[in-house]
Amino acid sequence: MTVLYAKELREAGAKVNAVSPGYRATELNGGLPTPGAGDPAGGAAVAVTMALMDEDGPTGEFHSNTGAIDPW
């Protein structure tokens, strides 16, 4: 779906990417320090980075919370 929207909206100048925040301690898992769960603020970093990218930024990609670009 991400790639489809990225292609469809390219001419309008929109960037469409998917991001994964990773496993985070949120209310969905009790909000408690859960083994392996990271801070929610850390998971938001990849979304903020993608939202603030400039016009030369990527489109149609899947970015993990570690900064890696995961293959489709």
Image (cartoon, rainbow, N blue to C red):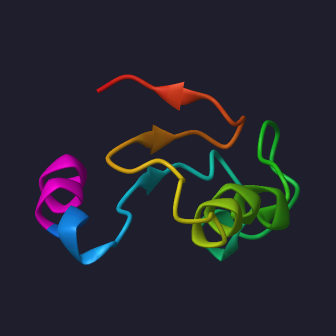
Label count reads 0
> Is residue 38 shown left or right of residue 20?
right
* Residue depicted at x 33% and y 72%: 13
Residue 9 x %, y %: 19, 69
Which quarter of the image is occupied by the C terminus?
top left
* Residue depicted at x 62% and y 29%: 68
Residue 20 x %, y %: 53, 49
The front one of 52 and 72 is 52
* Residue depicted at x 62% and y 53%: 21
> Mainly helix, strand or loop, the magenta region?
helix
Would you say residue 61 sits in the magenta stretch?
no
> Is residue 21 shown left or right of residue 56?
right
Is 54 situated above or below 24? below
Is 29 situated above or below 63? below
* Residue depicted at x 82% and y 57%: 42
> Is residue 32 shown left or right of residue 67?
right
Specify the segment rendered in magenta. 1-8
The front one of 34 and 55 is 55
**Direction top: furthest residue:** 71
Which quarter of the image is occupied by the N terminus?
bottom left
The front one of 32 and 72 is 72
Q: Quadrant of residue 30?
A: bottom right
Residue 22 x %, y %: 63, 45
Residue 44 x %, y %: 71, 65
